[in-house]
Amino acid sequence: MTAHIDLSKAGILAESSAVRVALLPPVARFSLRAATPEQKALSKALGITLPAKIGQCGRKGDIEIICLGPDEWTIIAPEDQAGMITDACAAIYAKTPHSLTEISDREVTVRITGPKASDLITIGCPRDLDQLPVGEARRTVFDGVTTVLWRDGDQDYRLDLWRSFAPHVIALLETGCGELAGE
Amino acid sequence: MLLIHCPYCDETLPELEFTYGGEAHIARPENPADKTDDEWRDFLFIRTNVKGPHFERWRHAHGCGRFFNAVRDTVSDRFLTTYKAGEPRPDLAVLLEDAAKKEPSK
């Protein structure tokens, strides 16, 4: 049932009285891996303290950093600030070994908002969403697909999806969007 | 659905985020060439297959991505504990005592 979905155009994918699903414009994404002793220097170089607890987010301006694992972070930034991040990390690379990989094209993000946004997430995600505080995010699963689920508000979520899985998940979200409106 | 505590995320999460990784605490021999064929066969294939508390590996595949160890009762499917990879095997007698305290009827 996976329909062809144009991932190059940001905009509303599905909308009903219950919930709205929208594809967000592209952003720069980086995967950062570093051991504990290097975290201080990296925080200083980036100007944002790397969150230490899995799921916590650090923010400064438009840049967001989420801790995904004990030594793994994802950095999200506007595309025009990507160079600043790569430069900052490259400058300390000699003394602070780490791995910074650009993964901007790997993922797309959909925003899910509306009075039944949480209900829509539960069609594919087995987590207890009450345990996910606003302002944090978690890497989890949505119908078998690994995603990063951000909670920006009580009924305001973002879902980072690997591009190749996105049509499948978006098709599910579109179906759920209609179903929830009919409830 | 089973709820599994990830020792790295420090959260109790649905089983769907995890994958099973076989029996835990099986160390690869330092120098496989020193082993006899029988010893090598045992390392590769022979497992305890216990009925009851089983030390096993799990991976938080849709989460932090880490392997960790768990003690699960293979009869009741109940998790007695989970702990980080590399940590020593917990004392089974203590775990069973704790479990009995939590559920006095059994």
Image: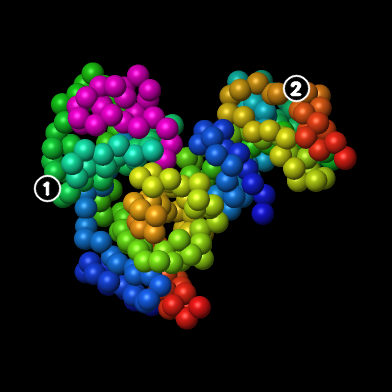
Relative to B56, is A131 above or below? below
Identify the residue at horizontal 35%, vertical 45% (top origin): A135
Which amino acid type is marked by label 1?
Asp
Which amino acid type is marked by label 2?
Asp
Relative to A130, is A99 above or below? above
Please indicate whether residue B70 sits to the left or right of residue A37 in the image.
right
Identify the residue at horizontal 30%, vertical 37% (top origin): A58
| Disc 1 chain ID | A
Identify the residue at horizontal 39%, vertical 30% (top origin): A52
Quadrant location, the C terminus of chain B: top right
Q: How many neighbours does mark 1 have within 10 angstroms: few (below 14), some (14-19), or many (20 or more)?
A: few
Residue B39, quarter of picture: top right
Q: In the displayed orientation, state which residue is furthest to the right.
A: B106
The residue where tag 2 is placed is: B91
Q: Which residues are magenta?
A: A34-55
Viewer-nearest residue: B77 or A150: A150
Disc 1 element: helix
Quadrant location, the N terminus of chain B: bottom right
Identify the residue at horizontal 39%, vertical 47% (top origin): A134
The residue where tag 1 is placed is: A80
| Disc 2 chain ID | B
Residue A172, quarter of picture: bottom left
Residues under labels 2 and 1: Cα distance?
Answer: 54 Å
Viewer-nearest residue: B85 or A128: A128
Residue A180 seen by the camera: yes
Q: Is residue A125 magenta?
A: no
Q: Is residue A47 magenta?
A: yes
Relative to B23, is A179 above or below? below
Q: At which x and y percent is residue A177? A: 42, 74
Q: At which x and y percent is residue A160? A: 35, 55
Viewer-nearest residue: A61 or B36: A61
